[in-house]
Amino acid sequence: MELMLRHFFIKNKEMINYLIFGALTTLVNWIVFQTINVIFMQHWSIANVIAWIIAVIFAYITNRKYVFHSESRRILRELVLFVQFRLFSLLLEMLIMYIFIEIILLAPFMSKVIAAVVIVIANYIFSKAIVFRERRSPHGSH
């Protein structure tokens, strides 16, 4: 059983690391969002954009280093691609939140939690398939 678990973790290391750092990125995003929205009483859309900026910086660094083990020397290209696809996911998140907050009348934080499920999946697909696909270190899963 222990050998099977070890094999599972080795085989799925990238996915497990993505889930760990994705959870941490989400936590950073949610803490910043709640702080700006509730404590500083800013509109949910302003709080969401500021939280997104901070979370994207955190996500890029952790995804590059710990999840996808990118060794690409084309860091600027990689960063631009990462931000482009995260901008797409921000627009998707804003649309989902708008629907839940302004139309369905759900609380902003609850709407953000619902949107996070869709966003995490979209971000993983974009990151794995496009942003960090070239030149992985031997520590990566490829």
Image (tube, rainbow, N blue to C red):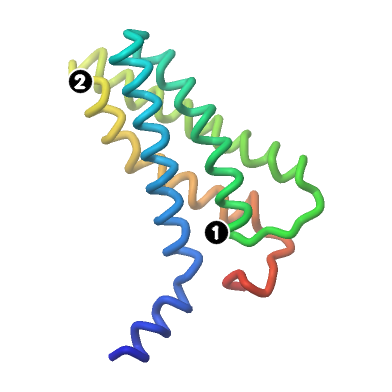
Residue bearing the label numbered 2: 107
Q: Nearer the viewer, residue 103 or 1?
A: 1
Q: Quadrant of residue 27?
A: top left
Which dot, 1 or 2, sits closer to the camera? 1
Residue 131: x and y in percent read 64, 49
As drawn, the label of residue 35 is none
Q: Regarding mark 1 in the picture, which secondary structure is present there?
A: helix
Residue 14: x and y in percent read 50, 65
Residue 140: x and y in percent read 61, 69
Residue farthest toward the right in the current orientation of the protein = 73
Residue type, label 2: Ala
Q: Is residue 47 above or below residue 64?
A: above
Q: Is residue 5 above or below residue 30?
A: below
Residue type, label 1: Val
Residue 13: x and y in percent read 48, 70
Q: Regarding mark 2 in the picture, which secondary structure is present there?
A: loop
- Crowding around mark 2 (Cα neighbors within 10 Å: few <14, some 14 to 19, many 20+) is few
Q: Quadrant of residue 112?
A: top left
In the image: residue 40, left or right of residue 88: left
Residue bearing the label numbered 1: 67
In the image: residue 120, left or right of residue 2: right
Q: For marks 1 and 2, give the CA distance.
A: 32 Å
In the image: residue 25, left or right of residue 74: left
